[in-house]
Amino acid sequence: MNSQVGDRTDSDDALPYYDSGSTHWGLWIVMVVAMLVFFGILAWAVVSIIRQRAAHAVGGTTPPSNASSDPVRILDQRLARGEIDVDEYARRRDILKGNGPATGSQ
């Protein structure tokens, strides 16, 4: 009294679309690559937003109120750091303010 129904196992009908238990490695690779791309884009977006907010908080993007004083301010900083001496500072400041010769001899 052996019937066909009794000889079948439960796993035969459980997942008929998985080709008798064999795996599709190509689909797994595509899923892993897609997941890595998704999380990479997500991480890039988070880092970009954080950097953008930090840049706005620190320096901002507003131009200086008096753009003509920027070269003099840089010259002041160079003197303070000791990159130039007082004579060089005075000569360059006079040129920047229009009081000195356009071409100087060194």
Image (cartoon, rainbow, N blue to C red):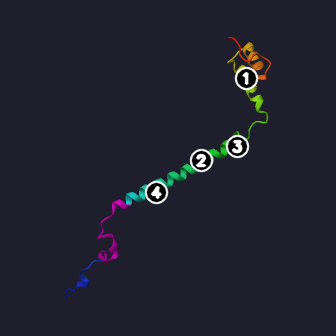
Relative depth, front residue between 47 and 96? 96
- Distance, label 3 to label 1, CA atoms, is 26 Å
Of callouts 3 and 1, which one flags the residue occurring earlier in the amino acid sequence? 3
Crowd around label 2: few <14 · some 14–19 · many ≥20 (10 Å):
few
In the rendering, at what x and y percent does residue 50 appear? 62, 47
Q: Position of residue 24 (x, y in %)?
A: 33, 63
Q: Which residue is mark 1?
A: 75
Q: Which amino acid, by three-letter code, is at mark 3? A: Ala
Q: Mark 2 and mark 3 in contact (Cβ < 8 Å)?
A: no
> Which residue position holds label 4?
35
Q: Are marks 1 and 2 in contact (CB under 8 Å)?
A: no
Q: Is residue 36 above or below residue 55?
A: below
Badge number at residue 15: none
* Badge 3 element: helix
Reading the chain from its start, which is encountered first: label 3 or label 4?
4
Q: Amino acid at mark 4?
A: Met
Residues under numbered marks 3 and 4 in contact, where contact means CB atoms less than 8 Å apart: no
Q: What is the span of residues highlighted in magenta in the rendered image?
A: 10-27
Q: Please report the residue visible at 75 percent of the width from the left and 25 percent of the height from the top.
A: 72
Label whose residue precedes the other's in the sequence (1 or 2): 2
Q: Which residue is mark 3?
A: 57
Density class for disc 3 (Cα within 10 Å; few <14, some 14-19, many ≥20) is few
Q: Quadrant of residue 28?
A: bottom left
Residue at (69, 11) in percent of width and height:
105
User: Disc 1 vs disc 4: Cβ atoms closer than 8 Å?
Assistant: no
Residue marked by disc 2: 48
If the image is split into quadrants, where does the N terminus sit? bottom left
Task: Give yes or no for contact between labels 2 and 4 (Cβ–Cβ under 8 Å).
Answer: no
